[in-house]
Image (cartoon, helix red, strand yellow):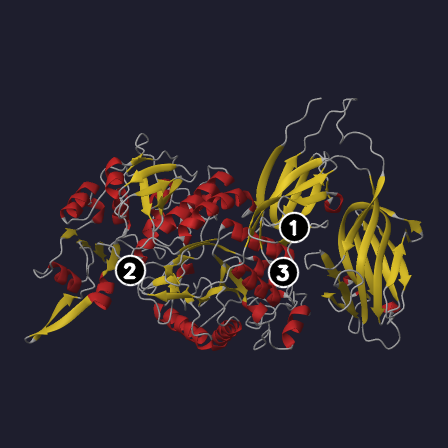
Amino acid sequence: METQPITRRSLLMGTGAVVATSVATSVLAGGMFPSEAAATPMTWVDVVGHFESKHEPWSVHLGNEYGAAVGEFTRDATRAAEGTQSGRLMGDFSAAGRYVALRKTLDRLAVTKVTFKVRTEGVSRVQVRLVSATQGQRNAQVNVTPGAPGWQSVEVTHWNNIAGMQDVIRLELQVWKDHMVLGAGSAIAWFDDVRVEHTVDPVVPSGLETTGLPLVLVGEPDLVPLVVRARYSDGALKDVTQHSTLSSGDESVLRINEFGYLTPVAPGATSITVDHLGATHEFPVEVRAPQELLPLRVEGGKLLEGDKRFGFTGFNYDLMMLRFPRTADWSGLDADIALMAHWGLRAVRVPINLGMVQPARGVFPDDEAWAGELTTRGMNSAWLAMLDHFVTQAGKHGIRLVLDWHRFPVDPYDYWSGGNNHDAGTGKPGTAFSYLAPSPTERGALDLSDPEHLATLLDSHRWMATHYKGNPSVMGIEIPHNEPHDAFMSVQSNWRRITEKCALTIKQADPDRLVFAMVGAYGHDVSTSVATWQLPNLVDGNAPHHYMPNAPLELRPDAQDRHSPWLARDIDDVFSHAIASLFAPYSTSPVPVYNGEGGSYGWDSFLPDMDQATAGDLMIEAALVQYYAAGAVGKMHWALWHNANDFVPFRESFDRHFRRYSPVYAAGPVDWSAATVALVQNPAAAPIANGHNFSVVPFVKLALDLNLGPFHLLTDDEIIDRLLTMVPTGLEQVDGLTAEFDYDAVVADRRNLDERVRAVLASDSFGLPILWVDDLEQLNKGQLADFLAGAGVPVDRRTSPDHQLVVGPEHLVVYRRSMQNPGRDKVHPRISREGSFRLVAENGDQVFSGTSAQLLSGGLRVQLDKWRSAIFRIES
């Protein structure tokens, strides 16, 4: 007999890891595969409700077709027929509605029997409903004794006096107002040990898919279970978890029960073997110990954890704003946290709708009215519990959250605030929390020139800071809010004053809480002092939003034809020097800087001739390399989680590149503070546009060509504010420079330069080597290299300008930023290390062993495709 080969692929998805296996099936004597052979029908019994885990997927239905009742479902640990908990369903029909129900989705089953155990209070009957794929319904009613001390066992085989039902997609356990006992204020039913008996034709599937967590923590009591689905030749998928054999490869690391629930025992790695009717595959799981985070602090402009510099890869997680306000998806949240940890993320930015914290003016979650403000709008009253869980669980995985006010109660029709978008424009008042809107029928915007709007924001900052006071799992709060950009906040003095108020409010509630500034112009202004080197008081860090193509580069001729024209810039220039140009104005920042949003957004405008997956992959890799090279302490990717266009096409890229670069960032950022070269320039030496500094770009290009490494961009106003001294000499004040102006070489651009700065730099007492230029565009690489070499500054004339060399605390990164010299692949990194060290490639191979001088002299061959990178670990 011939056996078909087994193949296996593993895709990390938002709901855990999905492992799909094509099953090896043997050819039968009759020439048929087992999946095609006739099978004898048999009966399977699925336990669909034991209510021991919050991840068991039951939902509540409020009987909306009769006017929604008030209903609540909880897992009740005070009574159970089996195990330790039961499912408690409460219905209150005093205001509206006729029934409430617990709903469970089924896989188009041929149901023959439903059994369960039940107790009730205030209601004498429960109804069992089956719903088919064609939305046909059948009902059966069961009499119960309300208030009885024990559990009543129920068995249902007929619905509407008909035995069983085919193609069932949903089971409902209902309590009705009509069946309430006289005088009862509400109806309560407890359910346990719910089982569905159904007939199947057992066949070997064409493949298996398993969803679960790729990474779990020791001691976690309620993990997302492993779910096994059989995939058949017609494309159908069925849950076969309870009809598969599940076994752990190492029970000293991880155990699993027949329902797919995991018990982590000790740190390590193992796999779960799945066997369903002879089809097998393995699901890898890593077990880690939970972490205890130290608080972060900023000292000397550096972000520190203990005494070590802190760096991170990160992501924006929009579901706290665009899903969980409506849906309590605990399994999805836990699976996403595990995925973040699997990628090695150390920080996650959490956009939040301010209305979920303050749904009515002055009403916060510790107010009794808060839950009612949410539930009356159909919102998720467990939202804050989910955010708290996110903070706690992420912290155990070593992930810190950054909180961001991203949405506000200004739109009466906003769905994610409890409104109905379809009512907009009809004149019908909106139902969303929108107390800052102009009226119940008008959409508005946050206006911090309005004292009431400002007070609302400050009160929300205060409440959030108090709620998470001292919690190291919260890395910080962004202030004043996401991407200020209106006319009022575009005025520097207004932005500074409001931002300082927010910082003061937060630190009065939690003195050690870090706050990160979100600058104007949608977060990408680098042309002003207040956005770069002269941040407001009390601010601990800067969190701009730079999307790689939106840089100080000329737009392409086709820009106006693109969906996002501001991203349609010269492709080669973007990959070559966009991020380096964007971050040069932060080179003297007194606080750490991370990029709060960026990534593959707008790929179709930037790279219109590439397929989506390739374009996104190049952008994701380039951003991880270049933000790190530019001195950012972290980089947060923006994508709408699980979105079919924004997330799903890039899942494999996220998995590959974040797992590559997370250890690089975690080892600490590139240190730009000790630069030995300064460029002195007026930021308007070339015209400013879109908040971008175009003046610095020519020098950035030359610095990259020479692999100069960190340099400082000193604007003339920064020198005047921070470095210029006035010392009395006789009857006059003589200008000079402080000792902080300590460089080996200075390049000065005369264009628009303040006369005071020009005079100091041109004076006979200025003792540093200085190169004056009238137009940086005219300065070439050779001229700059000769000047720097003469000043004793090392330059790299041997490595091709195609290569960008980045030396961090523990890694060398080589990036091919262009392909002008395709035959040159030798690089000459300058790594300052005492004695001998090794370079270890990503595949584990040692590629160099020796001293810094030997590496610099002999070089290293690194073969890379255009816009690709290589990482080498530096080991002593």
Q: Which of marks 1 and 2 is in front?
A: 1
Res. 815 visible in picture: no
Q: Name the residue under label 3.
A: 421
Point out the image quarter for the N terminus.
top right
Query: Of label 2 and label 3, which has the lower sequence position?
Result: 3
Which quadrant would residue 331 be assigned to in this image? bottom right
Image coordinates for residue 626, horizontal then vertical, percent? 37, 48
Give the residue at mark 2. 588
Q: Which of marks 2 and 3 is in front?
A: 2
Q: What residue type is labelled 1?
A: Arg
- Residue of label 1: 255
Gap between marks 2 and 3 measured at Cα: 46 Å
* Residue at image coords 76%, 60%: 83
Q: Where is residue 382 in the image (x, y as percent from the top left)?
A: 64, 66
* Disc 3 and disc 1 in contact, CB within 8 angstroms: no
**Residue 41, how many percent across, how many down?**
85, 38
Question: Of label 3 and label 1, which has the lower sequence position?
Answer: 1
Q: Nearer the viewer, residue 623 or 631?
A: 631
